[in-house]
Image: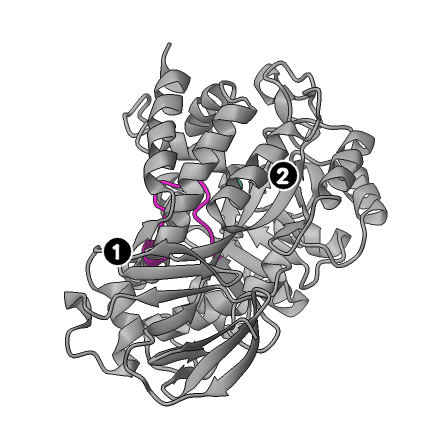
Amino acid sequence: MDELRDASLLWTPAGWRGDAGLELAAGRVARVVPAEPSGNGGWLLPGIANLHSHAFQRVMAGLTERQTHAQDSFWTWRETMYRIAARFDPDSLHAVAAQLYAEMLEAGYTSVCEFHYLHHAPDGTPYADPAAMSKALVAAARGTGIRLTLLPVLYMTGGFDRRPLSARQRRFGHDLDGFLRLFESLRAIEDDTLRVGVAFHSLRAVPPEAMAAALDALPPGIPLHVHIAEQIGEVQDCLTVRNARPVEWLLDHAPVDADWTLVHATHLTAGEIAGIAGSGATVAICPTTEANLGDGLFPLRDYLDAGGAWGIGSDSHVSVSPVEELRWLEYGQRLHTRHRNIAVGTDSSSVGETLLHGTLASGQRATGQPVGALSSGNAADWITLDQQAPAFAGARPEDVVDRWLFAGNRPLVREVRVAGTTVVADGRHRDRDAITGRYHRVVAALLAD
Ligand SMILES: [Zn+2]
């Protein structure tokens, strides 16, 4: 045994326990052990998994909020994104990802799924090491201490009509052989906090036969992520070319199961909701990005009624906070339905507890890592909340999660551990100053004309 950790309150799949502690060994929870309520062990919760991230987009936050056209949309935003993507190299990607991952840890995310398509040099030429950009992300994750599920992205065509990649998209592209070589080279560096899966960028970027060939060639049981049905425009294009809506097409043509995560399954029919829920796949909902981009509203209540698995992602990083993602997931529904307290389950009438249970329950299958519950054999990845904060004045255990998620904007995460190692203490990442100092220099150079 490496360590015994008391908890004043320990969050479990059944809710809070006041009589338990953790025995740790080699970065894992060896056992949950009976403990006297000590009052000083803190309120311990499993860290949150961030199911969707494009690290480089962190520098764009706040840069796309001026109107360029009365019909500004995802598609005009994407032009800015491509311009900024063209400026990155492995060193700047490392600096930006390190800042982002430190922010995530301070906010309570202890693992991140990085949906990574910035593979090559800006003109599309592979780097001397074709995995250089991927390895920059791995180095940032290892340096900051966040658990990483790296999802190299297969990106082949510029639209459903199979048009070639545009000049700006060329650095994203691979043929299947090159992509599989990249995947294998990354699998070779997996360790206890790094898992490698695969992402298909979208149905518009991966032709049907290429997706089938990739699925044949890849090992079973890896996390598989895909952008799906984020925009009405892509739903319409998919209907025109493939004679089916994106989710409908995917469920009919791919072996979708619990290994799959469908990112932005925003535009769904009742049949598609039932289909995803029945498949066991997870939907990654990114409420602040989906709001920022004007994507649309995920049909949360119907999806919960169907028993679907879901989690959250910070995606474009206009916000790096599980509190804000979960809060806006609920608020979007309230604004739409003009009712309150929408996301409640059969186990709890608390919105906060229902949201927390939901997002923790999907962590393991979406990341492919032993996260989401502090139980025997799982990762010793946890956060503690600041019991001294005014938001928690007079809180009973059953109030704590609702207070955390729905009371103000002061950061309430105090301590963060990943694989048993302390990465955030007193609310500050262990290397915050050095990481942020470098981030200022790198971003100033990156954005300079
Ligand atoms: Zn995305």
Q: Is residue 266 magenta?
A: no
The residue singled out by tag 2 in the image is 201
Q: Which percent across, then down, holds residue 49? A: 49, 58
Please tell me whether mark 2 sits on a helix, a strand or a loop. loop
* Label 1 CA crowd tier, 10 Å (few <14, some 14–19, many 20+): some
Question: Which disc number belongs to residue 113?
Answer: none
Q: Would residue 125 be visible to someone looking at this image? A: yes
In percent of the image, x 39 and y 38: which residue is there?
Answer: 293
For badge 1, the amino acid type reads Pro
Nearer to us of marks 1 and 2 is: 1
For badge 2, the amino acid type reads His
Question: What type of secondary structure mainly makes up the magenta span?
Answer: loop
Q: Which residues are magenta?
A: 312-325
Please tell me whether mark 1 sits on a helix, a strand or a loop. loop
Q: Which percent across, then down, holds residue 449? A: 37, 9
In percent of the image, x 81 and y 45: which residue is there?
Answer: 212
The residue singled out by tag 1 in the image is 411
Q: Is residue 43 above or below residue 149?
A: below
